[in-house]
Amino acid sequence: MTGPLLRIRDLEVAYRTGGIDLPALRGVSLDVAPGEVVAVVGESGSGKSTLAHAVVGLLPPNASVGAGSVTLGGDELLGRSERTMRPIRGARIGLVPQDPTVSLNPVQRVGGQVAEALRVHGLAGRRSARLAAIDLLERAGLPDPHVRARQYPHELSGGMRQRVLIAIAIAAGPELLIADEPTSALDATVQKRILDHVEDLTRESGTAVLLVTHDLGVAADRADRIVVMSGGRLVEQGPTAAVLAAPTDPYTRSLLAAAPGLAAASAPPTPARTVGPARRGPTATPPLVSVRGLVKDFPLPRSAGRGAVLRAVDDVSFDLGRGETLALVGESGSGKSTTARLVLRLADPTAGTASFDGTDVTTLRGEAWRALRRRAQLVHQNPYASLDPRFTIAEVVAEPLRASAVGSAAERRARAADLVDRVALPGSVLDRRPAELSGGQRQRVAIARALALEPDLVVCHEPVSALDVSVQAQVLDLLAELQTEQQLAYLFISHDLAVVRRVAHRVGVMRDGKLLELAPTEELFASPRADCTRELLAAVAGTRDRRAGLAR
């Protein structure tokens, strides 16, 4: 076809909240050609996800389209009924949603959910759909796809669930793929494989991609054009190389300056600016957290054999001192998240011990455990599932204070207001509910809640993966400030090596449940010993030769 595949003109969308219409999109216009990758970037709340949902007809009930036009191959999409949109979704437009937890059916095996995408569009029968689903899961980068197809979503890591969503989105070979933060939950190597596959898809079939992302490194590596949004408006767009080399809008320049991946890519081979306390050598003080020989086995489905288990954590040992940040990195499914859960006693180990301030938490029970648990808090990976939708933001942040009987109601409200301000949210969010906030805003609320009790240890489970780069920098600075003031210890679980390079004193690299390498951050980035560490470093977004990507 000639001309753009997707054509958006003067699109205006508003959300009705508390009897007031809040504009989300203000006259947005853009085109996406067949086979083209267009990245939409901007801070959380800028309107980029609203734009994606408007195209696919999945705006929430309180949203209204005030004006504009959205056409796909010349067919108008706005104003269509749900019945007439269903054949378009999946077959002509594939969607990779941002949140894998709420987007998958928790009581249906993942293979069946992928097969369903083929059956509803008449692309496979019941038997052939099951086999095709395994192939799609493999193409999406899921290890052992025949085993994973028999598992339920809760049995997979966040990154694995995201790959299931990608398999569903590409099942019918759509003309347009809308990817709303498709790799925010993925480690660098899997992210690279997924984005390589999406790139191959566009090259071979002419599929267009509208890539919604806060990761400027991903946009820099993968997009033909970049569209920058702020406050519901399109403030800048152009070829990727031109926007990155000579941005014309001050907002774009501020985004680029705050992107750790791009900064690391252009910097000499020395660590990027480190937040937090100065690097230090070994100390004589006892560690706050001491892990020895941790093992965790999970039973596999019967199809994998009688008594078969998955060893998620395999003989892991490390120490974490007061005021120190230890980062655990590795591919999705490497065991880093399970290790964090064992440290917090959110799961019981099969073998080994985890001690907190000299006390073995693997055997602690009752009131003694509750008192110690107050000193260790968790920032969850998923801001959609970790906040109670019935609570206001003030209630969410103050919940740990209320549960621990700290302060009066007025004092808890004041503490919540202070924490919300410190994670760069306006005070007006206190009386709103999680559903009224973007993914990045919800994650900032989760961080504020974890800090409410002023703990000694904070396990940060992908704490900034849902945040845009400028807010990411603010949150990392906040974590560093709190560490300096209170000698907080952070166990930092992340797939973003650019962030890890900035915040961690030491880095541990995990694969297949084993801790393969543990070294000071400068040493690990300069002279990695393990092959998997070198693979992770080579796959960091923002380091790809963009000229090769733009020359196709």
Image (cartoon, rainbow, N blue to C red):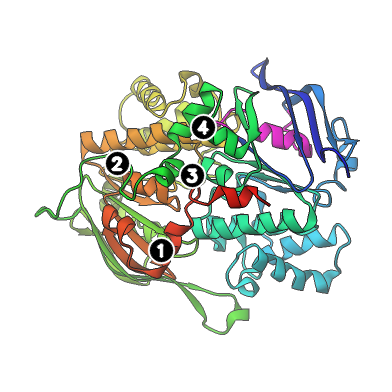
Mark 4 = which residue?
A: 441
Image location (x, y in percent) of residue 483? 25, 38
Mark 1 = which residue?
A: 534
Q: Secondary structure at mark 2?
A: loop
**Magenta segment, which residues?**
41-61
Quadrant containing the N terminus is: top right
Please indicate whether residue 8 sits to the left or right of residue 158 in the image: right
Question: Earlier along the polypeptide chain: callout 1 or callout 2?
Answer: 2
Mark 3 vs mark 1: give the one in front: 1
Q: Residue at x 30, y 54 (%)?
A: 366
Please indicate whether residue 335 sits to the left or right of residue 353 in the image: right
Q: Is residue 495 magenta?
A: no
State how far apart marks 3 and 1 are (Cα).
22 Å
Looking at the rendered structure, the kind of residue marked 2 is: Thr
Mark 3 = which residue?
A: 465
Q: Residue at x 55, y 24 (%)?
A: 432
Looking at the rendered structure, the kind of residue marked 3 is: Ser
Question: Earlier along the polypeptide chain: callout 4 or callout 1?
Answer: 4
Q: Nearer the viewer, residue 73 or 323?
A: 73
State how far apart marks 4 and 3 are (Cα).
12 Å
Q: Secondary structure at mark 1?
A: helix
State how far apart marks 4 and 1 are (Cα).
33 Å
Image location (x, y in percent) of residue 42? 57, 31
Mark 2 = which residue?
A: 274
